[in-house]
Each structure stands twice: as structure tokens, then as C-alpha cells.
Image (cartoon, rainbow, N blue to C red):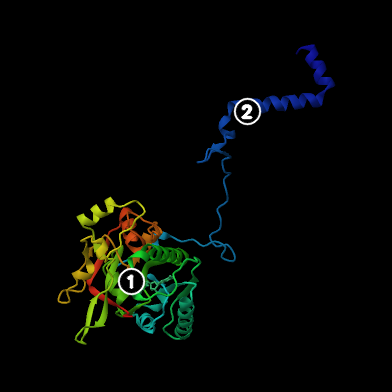
């Protein structure tokens, strides 16, 4: 060895060791780059590879971790037998005893039913909430009690104050009203849907007649989206009790409807059932035939929300109620459009009736 080097090693042993370690580190990094590689994550930043980890025990003390297999959440034609979880959702501005009595009378196992409400912050909402509270206390202390009940107070301040049926239906207020309703429905479903919810039934609070077998009858069709036909009882000019169509939001699109949509500015919506906006769509309300089978199905492009059954998966996939013009549609009709864009086909039951309160 070079005598100068020998001299250096003898006189400076610590520096020699430090130099040797540095040299070996450089060689190691240069020849075995893999062991040092930092991986890039999807954002392009470097991350060190994980060290092999000990498997996490499945049951930590105190149930800190819950695991759910979403593939096991089934929504089938045998919903009641399988006790598939149903979430019944109601935006509630007015409370009707008949509506509550029909919920309590549902023959679907109540242990598999959860209820969710959203109540506006208005005087009318306060009154409805007081009645709802009373009804809940009675039912939940009885054998008919439901698995769970959630009540939300609406957080938007632009809710319309109490309105008569005529005022609510005025074409001028439709966009603002339906937009507020869409926001309320979205808040309600996103807050209450659970990991084990199989079905969501949207049921308006002013549906005062519906069969006890409503859930079995509608789930039997095993459709992603299916809507009942909503009628109303009234006394005709001769004083005779009669029925008429109430909800015109369930329909099949027409050529004229599509042309009308194409002619409108992006933000403008089409609302069904107004002469000012004749679409000539085929309305499910007029497809009703009491002499035919009540389980006849028709495919739809727009749906109403009075009694609307949706597989929870459809909402989980992102189908919601657009509070803005979505292909010139809003709220429940916009929901049908969005679901269709996600690949789901809505259906309607023209001969399966529920009845709306007559103000
Ligand atoms: N949360 C909430 N619910 C509302 C509001 N307005 C109406 N509702 C409820 O939403 C559902 C549909 O509204 P409704 O006024 O009956 O619509 P219409 O029958 O088409 O005139 C019913 O269950 C109402 O009680 C509101 O501003 N906020
Ligand atoms: Mg109504």
C-alpha cells in the first residue's frame, strides 16, 4: 500500500472509518437502486415503499373498525322475505294523520324499515314537526316501532313560506320551488342512507291513501327505479265522488318535448302539466286503466316523487335530484334523467294507485 495512505490510516483511524462508510454507501446506492427507490404516488410525489406490516387483527377491542361488504347488500324481488333494509324518505312541510297511519299499517317487517324526514324552517314546518313528534312517540313505544327514525331541519333559508295548492303550482314559482325541494331531497338522502340500505322509498307526506303492501308490491318488480301513479279524490260538479290524475311528473319523452328543450336557453327548465309549455309527452297519469292488471309496467323518462322506489345502489352511484337545469329538467324529473345517464331505466306502474290529499 502507498506509504502516504498507510500514514494517513495510522494517524487518523476515525476519519478513515468515516471515509470507508461513505464510500460503501455510495457503492450500495449506485448498484442496488431498487432497495432505495421511492415510488411515485398518483399525484407524482415520492413515497417510500411500505414495510411489510403485521396483519391488523379483525376484531380490535371496542369495535374500532367496522367492515362492510357492499356486494352483500341485495335488493331483490323477495325484499320482505329477505328483510332487505328500506329507507322511507319524506320531505315534510305538512303532516297528515292518514299518511302516518298508512306507514304504521305497512305489512313489510318494521324492523327492516328506517324513516327519514326533512322539515322546512317555516311556521308550517314547525306545526308539521310537532305533529310528527307526537306520532313518533306513540309508534316507537309500541310493537309497530320502526328500526330508526331521523329528522332533519332544512338549512337553506330560501324555503317558500306556506302556500296553497294553487300558489305552489303557479308556473312562475316552479323553478325556485322545485330547486328548493331538490336541495331538501339531496340533504335527506345523503344524510340518512346507510351502508346496509337496500331500497329507498320516496313518499310525500300528503299521500293519504296507499296500500299496506306498498313495499312488497313495488319491490316485487325488482326495478332500479319504479314509481306508482298518484291520483286524487274529489267531488265533481254533480256532487259525486270521483278520482282524477294528480302527479304529471311521470312521463315518456316526445319529439315535441325534445324540440322544445333544444330551443331553450341552458338554464331554462320544462315543467310538465302546464298549457304554456305543451310538450305532448305521454303522461303516465293518463295511462291508467282500472280494468287492466295493476302490475303493468311502462318505461319512463321523467318520474314524480310522490311514491317513488329506488334501489339504494342508484343513489350510491351518484344519481341525485338536480337543483339546477339538467337537460332542462329539475328535481325528480332531473333525477330520472341523471339515472338514465348512469345507465338505469326508470319504470312506472300506471294502474297502481296512491292518492294525494285534496286541499
Ligand atoms: N323539506 C321540505 N319539504 C317540503 C317543502 N315544501 C313541500 N314539502 C314536502 O314535499 C312534498 C312535496 O311537496 P308538495 O308541496 O306536496 O308538492 P305538490 O304536491 O307537487 O304540490 C310533500 O311531502 C311536502 O310536505 C319544503 O319547502 N321543504
Ligand atoms: Mg303534494
Q: Residue 198 placed where, x, y %?
A: 38, 66
Element assignment for label 2 = helix
Give the vertical position of 30 relative to 126 (above or below).
above
In the image, taking residue 101 as reference, residue 23 lies left or right, namely: right
Does residue 134 appear in the picture of this structure?
yes
In percent of the image, x 59 and y 26: which residue is there? 31
**Nearer the observer, 207 or 48:** 207
| Res 306 → quadrant | bottom left
Query: First in sequence: mark 2 or mark 1?
Result: 2
Element assignment for label 1 = loop
Q: Residues within 10 Å of mark 1 (few under 14, many from 20)?
A: many
| Residue sticking out furthest to the left | 291
In percent of the image, x 67 and y 26: which residue is there? 24
Q: Residue 182 placed where, x, y %?
A: 40, 63
In percent of the image, x 57 and y 51: which residue is there? 54
Q: Please identify the quadrant where the N terminus is shown.
A: top right
Is ligand 2 less than 8 Å from the beta carbon at label 1? Answer: yes
Q: Please identify the quadrant where the C terminus is shown.
A: bottom left
* Residue with the mark numbered 2: 28
| Res 171 → quadrant | bottom left
Which mark, residue 306? 1
Q: Residue 77 placed where, x, y %?
A: 29, 68
Which dot, 2 or 1, sits closer to the camera? Answer: 1
In the image, taking residue 195 as reference, residue 304 lies left or right, namely: left
Is ligand 1 less than 8 Å from the beta carbon at label 2? Answer: no
Give the vertical position of 70 relative to 151 (above or below).
above
Q: Residues within 10 Å of mark 2 (few under 14, many from 20)?
A: few
Give the alpha-carbon distance from disc 2 to disc 1, as whole Å: 71 Å
Amino acid at each position: 500500500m502507498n506509504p502516504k495512505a498507510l500514514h494517513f490510516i495510522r494517524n487518523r483511524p476515525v476519519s478513515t472509518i468515516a471515509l470507508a462508510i461513505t464510500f460503501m454507501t455510495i457503492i450500495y446506492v449506485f448498484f442496488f437502486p431498487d432497495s432505495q427507490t421511492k415510488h411515485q404516488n398518483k399525484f407524482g410525489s415520492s413515497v417510500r415503499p411500505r414495510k411489510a406490516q403485521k396483519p391488523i387483527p379483525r376484531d380490535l377491542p371496542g369495535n374500532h373498525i367496522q367492515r362492510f361488504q357492499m356486494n352483500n347488500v341485495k335488493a331483490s324481488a323477495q325484499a320482505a322475505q329477505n328483510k332487505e333494509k328500506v329507507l322511507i324518505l319524506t320531505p315534510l312541510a305538512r303532516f297528515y294523520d292518514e299518511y302516518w297511519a298508512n306507514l304504521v299499517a305497512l305489512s313489510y317487517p318494521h324492523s327492516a324499515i328506517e324513516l327519514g324526514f326533512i322539515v322546512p324552517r317555516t311556521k308550517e314546518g314547525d306545526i308539521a314537526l310537532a305533529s310528527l313528534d307526537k306520532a313518533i312517540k306513540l309508534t316507537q313505544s309500541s310493537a309497530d316501532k320502526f328500526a330508526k327514525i331521523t329528522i332533519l331541519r332544512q338549512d337553506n333559508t330560501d324555503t317558500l313560506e306556506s302556500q296553497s295548492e294553487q300558489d305552489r303550482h303557479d308556473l312562475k314559482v316552479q323553478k325556485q320551488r322545485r330547486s328548493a325541494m331538490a336541495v331538501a331531497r339531496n340533504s335527506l338522502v345523503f344524510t340518512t342512507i346507510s351502508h346496509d340500505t337496500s331500497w329507498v322509498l320516496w313518499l310525500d307526506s300528503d299521500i293519504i291513501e296507499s296500500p299496506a303492501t306498498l313495499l312488497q308490491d313495488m319491490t316485487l318488480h325488482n326495478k332500479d327505479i319504479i314509481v306508482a301513479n298518484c291520483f286524487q279524490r274529489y267531488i265533481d260538479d254533480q256532487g259525486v265522488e270521483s278520482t282524477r290524475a294528480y302527479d304529471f311528473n311521470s312521463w315518456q319523452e316526445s319529439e315535441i318535448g325534445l324540440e322544445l328543450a333544444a330551443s331553450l336557453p341552458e338554464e331554462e327548465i320544462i315543467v310538465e302539466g302546464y298549457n304554456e309549455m305543451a310538450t305532448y309527452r305521454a303522461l303516465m297519469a293518463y295511462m291508467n286503466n282500472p280494468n287492466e292488471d295493476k302490475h303493468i309496467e311502462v318505461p319512463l323518462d321523467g318520474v314524480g316523487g310522490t311514491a317513488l322506489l329506488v334501489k339504494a345502489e342508484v343513489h350510491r352511484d351518484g344519481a341525485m335530484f338536480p337543483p339546477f337545469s339538467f337537460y332542462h329538467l329539475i328535481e325528480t324529473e332531473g333525477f330520472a334523467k341523471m339515472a338514465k345517464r348512469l345507465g338505469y331505466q326508470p319504470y312506472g306502474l300506471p294502474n297502481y294507485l296512491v292518492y294525494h290529499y285534496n286541499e
